[in-house]
Amino acid sequence: MGMQSPGPIKQWRLSIGTLLFVGLGLVLTAAATLGFVLWSAAAVDRRALDQQAALARHVIQSQLARVPHEQESITIWDDSIVNTSIAFNEEWINVNIGRWMLDYFGHDDVLIVNQANQPIYAMAEGSAMGDARRDAALAQIMPLISQMRVQIAGGGLDAYNAGSVAHPPRVSELAVIDGTPALVSISPIISDSGTLTQPTGSEYLHVSMVRLDDDYASRLGEEYQIPALSFSFAGSAVPGIAEIPLTDIDGRFIAFLEWQQSRPGQALLDQAIPAIAGAFLIAALIMLVLMRQLWRNSSALEAGRADAEFQAAHDHLTGLPNRLRFESALTQVLMQRPDRDRRISILVMDLDRFKTVNDTLGHRAGDDLIRAVGQRLSQLLGPDEILARLGGDEFAIIHRHAPGLNGPFVLSNRIIDAIGKPFDIFGSEAFVGVSIGIATVESEEADAHELVRKADIALYEAKAGGRNRAIVFEETMNELLQNQKTIEVELREALRLKDQLSVAFQPLFAADGSIIGAEALARWTHPRLGQISPTHFVPVAEATGLIGALGSFVLRVACELGAKWPGYTFAVNISPAQLRDASFPSTVFDMLAQTGMRPVDLELEVTEGILLEEASEAAEALRIFRAADIKIALDDFGTGYSSLNYLKRYPVDRVKIDRSFVSQLAPGSVSIAIVQAMVTLAHALRIDVTAEGVETQEQMAVLRALGCNVYQGFLLSAPIPSAAFEKLLTEPESRVA
């Protein structure tokens, strides 16, 4: 008979060893799991007890704060002064103070004492309080009354009347009244309108007492979900009953606050032990495999759900809350009870010159810039403020601050300073600004959509007012918006009829006083509204797409006059919207051909921002005009972000120094050095310099000394009709030297 092969034996031993190892592992795992469950259950119960005790203390503190707040409904009231200290009216007091505090707030006992701390009214549970009970209660609360008198004498009421503190003096304490623990709160009776003045110390005091009895404990237990809540003078020895001692401000014992202890750990343990034992005894290996797979599937599902929820409520580019999440958060904030010490404002922000960066450096750079802006804004905010990206280059903040507008303005200035610093985008410095619209919650009925609408209106005003600034919404802005809509409608009609619009010409003077041309300026005389300033209707035309028609009207009138006076330069302001229109160069050349004006006599004034639009229709249009000998002037020079590189890339014939610099020209002014630098830079590039807004002889003298080539301003001539300008050209003796 042959020998048995050792292979199966070794395999069997290996299997037995493996099973024993697995079995031992399961036993150890079961023991460890059971020990962990027991320990965890005990730890959970300890933490639960700590949390319940903290909640109980919070409940008492909240009641101590709530009672004086409820008293203010009748203690800060002119009628209360009239019917207590001026003309005592017991029936009125009984209805409006005694019964009111009992029925509406649940205050059991009410006392009113005069300036000598003598009781003039006493009510207990809706009925007149007996003299003995009244005197006993008064004796027990007299130390608290003395505290109130000390606060009043120390200027507590004066500080409240001056607005430096949020509420009048108050004393709220635990005490034992007539053998029962109670909440006692004392408040002075003062005027709500400020018309009834009382000498300091003569104020009557209102005393509310809320008994900490079984009914009150039951109500608190239901309100705060604390089971079997009660008050007692002797601690309970019943298992499962938790308690904390209550003391007054001097540390004297008042009562125990007791409740049924919640033991979630023990409850969980009672349910988990059978399931754990059964699971390990019946299908330990299967459960391990299933649990492992279930864990993987659950983790993947939870991760997917959490990611989907995050994506739905957050901006994919910055990770900030999106518009939907912002409006939801704002609605929740507005639903909270108002706090007289805190206010809510929203700041809606829009980046200035973002499109320029986006067009110049590309959309990837624009995305990087948006992310960088979001990071800078996040660093400026506190933990209780909410930042969101509403879309595009628009952000919004829910800002909590002290009463007044100082908080929003301080935050806005910090934002403007932070965003104004250069951003490193793909190795290049990008500059943007930010305009901010602010709307503040004025009442607890504020609507989220209405608040955002107001902030948007303020944002529009900030942009219209020069950008890179913060504007607070005012109701007059609604009227202004309606006026702008009216201007839009009337301007459309004026452009159709052409009998209301005209063009004025402001002469351009050389250094020797000779006229070298004029700037064409749109004017509008409405038959009902009268003369409408260009500062009102030109921005409306730009915002509504009417600037093309308005600009064409001014350009045609200027070309017609230029054709009659060859050799003189006629300057016309061109908006970015016109230059971005691919057909605009054809429109200009058609007008020159129709009117007979020479291209060399036409000067188009553009703003600095246009030069930043690399590879855009505007840049191409400038090249076409330059090739046709049409002059290009850079308006408002020094107020934007153009660099020497842009001036070299798009050579211009003239730069116009903004009137903001000219107006400050005076001996010792820093503007002199700035203007000198501008003139030196322009002349180095063989570019003429025009100073606009010249209004005084002193300014004229400084500008001549600095080497400006051309001058324009009310000192020399206001804008005048074309006929008056032609007369000025034909009468040399009328020219300004």
Image: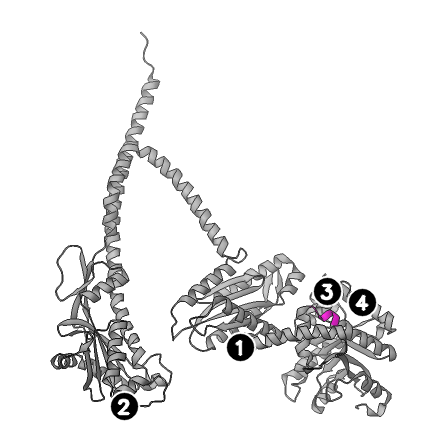
Residue 86 numbered mark, or none = 2
Q: CA distance from mark 3 to mark 1?
A: 35 Å
The part of the image, by quadrant, that contains residue 286 is top left
Disc 2 to disc 4: CB gap under 8 Å: no
- Residue 550: percent from left, percent from top: 74, 73
* First-in-chain label (2 vs 4): 2
Report which residue position mark 4 lands on. Answer: 587
* First-in-chain label (2 vs 1): 2
The residue lying toward the viewer, choosing from 703 and 108, is: 108
Q: Is residue 337 left or right of residue 692?
A: left
Report which residue position mark 3 lands on. Answer: 580
* First-in-chain label (3 vs 1): 1
- Residue 85: percent from left, percent from top: 26, 89
Badge 2 local density, few (<14 within 10 Å), some, or many (20+)? few
Write the start and end of the magenta stretch as one range. Answer: 545-549
- Residue 317: percent from left, percent from top: 55, 56
Report which residue position mark 1 lands on. Answer: 475
Main SS, magenta region, reads helix
